[in-house]
Image (cartoon, rainbow, N blue to C red):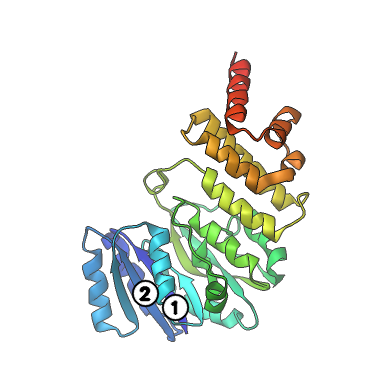
Amino acid sequence: MISIIVPIYNAEKYLYRCIDSILEQTFSDFELLLIDDGSTDKSGVICDHYSNKDSRVKTIHKKNGGECSARNVGLDNVSGEWVAFVDADDYVEPNWLSIFMDSCNGYDIVVQGFFCDGTEYPFPTGIAYKGKSKDGLPLLINNGISGYVWVKLFRLDIIKKNDIRFNENIHFRGDEDFVLKYILFSNNMVCTPEKGYHYVVPEWSSKYKYLDNFYTSCSIFTSIKQIYKDSSNVIYQRYLQELNNALFYSFKVKYKDCEHRIIVYQQIVGNDVLKSPLNFFTRWILYLIHSPKIVVWLFDIKEKFFAK
């Protein structure tokens, strides 16, 4: 059985379309968990309507805590062998689950393609691959689909055994963080270019209000470091550079916890900072100086000097 988790917050405009499309699946052995994340519109009422008329549907109402929190509540209540996710503003084709089940035998994670409604996606939205998860991940990353949980099918036993959760302390890219944690513990992956999911492109400015990427990058890089232990690996270097950029953005904006961020960065990156694409001066400051106050002070001076 597949457990489908749908986090919902004030989605009454799209919810009927989303739920109806799931209930019309040609593969019928599934349960649908609607997680009402403290909606203030009629979303909760709509969810109750469906759970009252279809035994496959279960509604859980909770205090608002964000998408990651809602998905975690879903994971706490699933009973299927497999887990899939749908966003409340998206919808699926009748063969969406069948595509997963036709490919899943012998694999820990299944990835399918998707339709992109509202704009042209800059990468292929479906790829073909069978093999080790570690070797398949670069294909997902380079094609811009590593961070979408809704085109992937996950084994519940791997999630439970390794206590894989959505990080409720980060405000965006929680999907990618979860996927990387999962891949760390999965052996193999299958990807099919077949498409059954409709991704409705959101209004980015309203969906993502937080520009601070530092702690998200820390969590993601920690997983990448465990997956690819070789610091010369291209993917490793890519995410290390992303973390570097997030750290220096913190200095530029002058977040109040910059000193704490230095401590976190040094703990996560360690000696590998010397192999990063930073300039000589920056690398050695981050490697040698373990007083965060001094590090912040030095970078303030450096920024003022180059600003002139």
Decide if residue 297 is in sight here. Answer: yes
Q: Percent x, y for residue 25?
A: 42, 80
Q: Secondary structure at mark 1?
A: strand
Residue with the most extreme top position: 308
Seen from the viewer's position, the closer of residues 133 and 23 is: 133
Seen from the viewer's position, the closer of residues 115 and 4 is: 4
Q: Secondary structure at mark 2?
A: strand
Decide if residue 99 is in sight here. Answer: no
Q: Is residue 191 above or below residue 171?
A: below
Q: Would you name the residue on which mark 2 appears?
A: 33
Displayed quadrant of residue 79: bottom left
Residue under the image location 64 percent in, 71 percent down: 186
Q: Which mark is residue 26?
A: none
Mark 2 vs mark 1: which is more N-terminal?
Answer: 1
Measured in 3D between alpha carbons, the distance from the residue under mark 2 to the one under mark 1, in whole angstroms, is: 7 Å
| Amino acid bearing label 1 | Ser
Q: Are marks 2 and 1 in contact (CB under 8 Å)?
A: yes
Q: Percent x, y for residue 257?
A: 49, 36
Q: Is residue 85 above or below residue 2?
A: above
Query: Which quadrant: the C terminus?
Result: top right
